[in-house]
Amino acid sequence: MSKELRKYIETALSKGASKEQITETLVSSGWSAEVIKKITSDFAAVDSFGIPVPAPKMQAHHVSRDLFVYFIIFITLSFSSFAVGSIFFELVDYFFKNLTGHRYSHTNISWALAQLIVAFPIFSLLSAWVNKNLEKYPEKRESLIRKLMIYFILTITAIVSISDLIIVLAGFLKGELTLTFILDSLVVLGISILIFSYYFYEVRQDDNLIKIKSDTQND
């Protein structure tokens, strides 16, 4: 799709349209201002105004595809996280069952393993495909769907982490903390931190790319 956008900008410039006019028209058509700025910087400026060329619209199937891919990533990430948490919960109960009186459940851990075996490979493959696509088309880092998905995941993991800490603190204040409760809370906190760190790194990568592009254009 970036080739179509580049062709449109080149055609518009050749007909006398200014960069400002092109940017305004494309932004109103749904394109990212950062992507437009990146492409227009590759062409010589045109000061005079010409007849506007109809701007290409973002194709619906690209938006639908991205929405589908990121939704499946979120779902499989959720399944994988719950599965890992369940496995660790059962392992904690298994090693400390004499203290808690809890019986180790083969059914629970089998179900968790099944979720992990199915969901995690799908999550890994889709994430790898997205990252490879971003390397080929860096401008897709500005995708609204991508940003919404990342910040939604960051929000969920932050809520889970904060809730986990509140529950632990409440248990401590009431004097109801047990070893298994503390270990289970650490499992939840650890999984949340790993997910948050990964996607926060993605956000930093996006911000650094924008900063690099901005510095290059200013030079």
Image: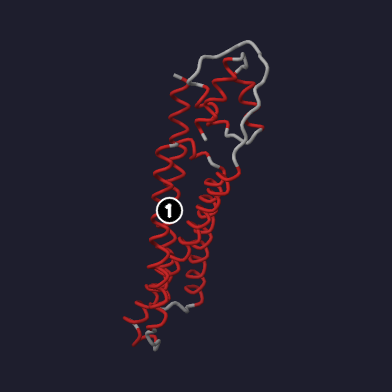
The location of residue 133, given as percent across then percent down, is: 42, 42
Q: In the image, what residue occupies the spot 68% across and 17% down?
A: 51
The location of residue 152, given as percent across then percent down, is: 55, 53
The location of residue 126, given as percent across then percent down, is: 43, 53
Asked if 46 appears above or below 130 in the picture, the reply is above
Front-lying residue, 168 or 43: 43
Secondary structure, mark 1, is helix
Residue designated by label 1: 126
Asked if 200 appears above or below 176 in the picture, the reply is above
The location of residue 166, given as percent across then percent down, is: 52, 66
Quadrant location of the C terminus?
Answer: top left
Q: In the image, what residue occupies the spot 35% across and 85% down?
A: 97
Instruction: Please state the total of marks drawn on the protein image.
Output: 1
From the viewer's perspective, tell me whether residue 59 is left or right of residue 69.
Answer: right
Q: Please rate how many residues cluster around mark 1, counting C-alpha atoms within 10 Å: few if below 14, some from 14 to 19, many from 20.
A: some
Q: In the image, what residue occupies the spot 40% across and 39% down?
A: 135
Asked if 134 appears above or below 193 in the picture, the reply is above
- Colouring method of the image: secondary structure
Quadrant of the image occupied by residue 144: top right
Residue at the farthest left position = 95
Front-lying residue, 48 or 189: 48
Q: Which amino acid type is shown beneath numbered disc 1?
A: Leu
